[in-house]
């Protein structure tokens, strides 16, 4: 029989817990409490917010009082998970990725070739290195979005669970504006426009990938991307600014290929043409030329936050070879 804590209590939602779901708030503070128990206590009115019955999915606001019914006594605390220490060289490499750090967020310039998270056959990945970015905090930074392994550029981390919830809300409501740069094989017509495609997951040569959906495919996802041509080298190559309005897996890569201008070096999404992959361009490396250049978002502490990331060497060299003039990186910071 479970032993219950003796009394009903009230806890106040902190600023760091803004926009978090009620069930997630309970799992954070009472890790032994299951989802079914939380939902039952909400249905029966044992859990209330500001004295009112609520659903488990209710999002919380700082200053709200949460009624806590008698709870099962917490079991003896397990030993804290040890912090994963990196070797000095890996730690320096990780810290060199940091473009911005404050009490709420960390922004990295992820190099190409580094996976964001683990998976089959992946031993080294960014998520496994995040203890190295605590900078004295009790919290381990959290990923709030992802980049493909071979995509370089801006990656946003939350420094606390509450900030992670706020940022997740910003991504969910499309309050975060992302800008990518790509070098593509071809020249889109018109030079400014929108690409809309329906995508479907398929099994590919190197595992699951994404393709343009056919008329009979199910479980499709609609993808919308705005683009603008910043420069070009005749009809052979173009420098595109890409703004995804949806967040689908491999959206930009498939959209460019569907528009007849695959991203240079993106061989999985190129097509064979005259015995050559359309994403291969002689004289340029077969590395993905896709870079997360800029982020604009509501800062968790208020105001608007903007940041840009410099290009990785392989894209910078390709642009230099083509004579493209790259504007300097704008300084980052909060506005308002």
Image (spheres, grey):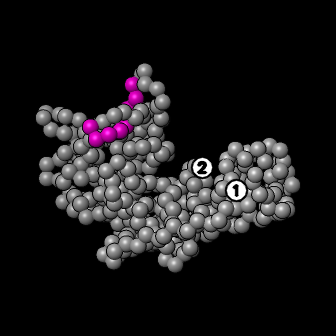
Query: How far across and how far down the image is residue 267, in percent?
Result: 24, 43
The residue at which mark 2 appears reads as 173
Quarter of the rendering containing residue 319 = bottom left
Of the numbered discs 1 and 2, the one sitting upstream in the chain is 1
Q: Residue at x 29, y 63 (%)?
A: 312
In this picture, residue 144 sits left or right of residue 242: right
In this picture, residue 149 sits left or right of residue 41: left
Label 1: element kind: helix
The residue at which mark 1 appears reads as 26
208 inside magenta stretch: yes
Label 2: element kind: loop
Q: CA distance from mark 1 to mark 2?
A: 24 Å
Which quadrant holds the C terminus?
bottom right
Q: Which residues are magenta?
A: 205-214
In this picture, residue 2 sits left or right of residue 283: right
35 inside magenta stretch: no
Q: Residue at x 46, y 40 (%)?
A: 224
* Viewer-side residue, 185 vs 64: 64
Visible residue check, residue 300: no
Q: Residue at x 70, y 62 (%)?
A: 74
Q: How many marks?
A: 2
Q: Residue at x 37, y 72 (%)?
A: 86
* Mark in the foreground, 1 or 2: 1
* Viewer-side residue, 228 vs 169: 169
Quarter of the rendering containing residue 166 = bottom right
* Viewer-side residue, 102 vs 138: 138
Magenta portion: prevailing SS class: strand
Query: How far across and how far down the image is residue 84, in percent?
Result: 43, 69
Query: How far across and how far down the image is residue 56, in percent?
Result: 72, 47
Visible residue check, residue 201: yes
Q: Residues within 10 Å of mark 2 (few under 14, many from 20)?
A: few
């Amino acid at each position: 029989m479970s032993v219950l804590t003796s009394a009903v209590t009230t806890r106040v939602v902190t600023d760091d817990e803004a926009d978090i779901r009620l069930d997630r708030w309970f799992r954070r503070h009472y890790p032994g409490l299951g989802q079914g128990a939380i939902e039952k206590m909400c249905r029966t009115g044992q859990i209330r917010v500001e004295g009112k019955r609520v659903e488990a999915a209710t999002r919380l606001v700082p200053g709200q009082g949460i009624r806590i019914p008698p709870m099962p006594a917490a079991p003896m605390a397990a030993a804290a998970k040890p912090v994963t220490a990196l070797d000095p060289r890996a730690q320096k490499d990780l810290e060199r990725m940091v473009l911005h750090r404050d009490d709420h967020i960390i922004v990295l310039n992820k190099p190409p070739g580094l996976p964001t998270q683990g998976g089959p056959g992946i031993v080294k990945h960014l998520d496994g290195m995040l203890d190295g970015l605590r900078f004295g905090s009790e919290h381990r930074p959290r990923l709030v979005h992802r980049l493909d392994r071979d995509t370089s550029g801006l990656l946003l981390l939350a420094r606390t669970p509450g900030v992670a919830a706020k940022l997740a809300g910003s991504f969910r409501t499309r309050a975060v504006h992302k800008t990518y740069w790509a070098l593509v094989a071809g020249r889109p017509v018109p030079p400014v426009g929108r690409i809309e495609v329906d995508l479907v997951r398929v099994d590919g040569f190197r595992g699951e990938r994404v393709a343009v959906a056919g008329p009979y495919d199910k479980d499709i996802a609609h993808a919308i991307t705005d683009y603008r041509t910043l420069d070009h080298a005749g009809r052979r190559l173009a420098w595109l600014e890409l703004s995804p309005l949806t967040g689908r897996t491999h959206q930009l890569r498939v959209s460019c290929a569907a528009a007849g201008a695959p991203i240079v070096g993106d061989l999985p999404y190129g097509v064979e043409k005259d015995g050559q992959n359309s994403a291969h361009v002689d004289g340029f490396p077969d590395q993905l030329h896709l870079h997360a250049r800029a982020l604009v978002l509501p800062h968790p502490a208020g105001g608007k936050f903007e940041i840009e990331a410099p290009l990785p060497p392989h894209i910078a060299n390709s642009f230099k070879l083509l004579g493209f003039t790259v504007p300097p990186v704008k300084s980052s910071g909060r506005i308002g």
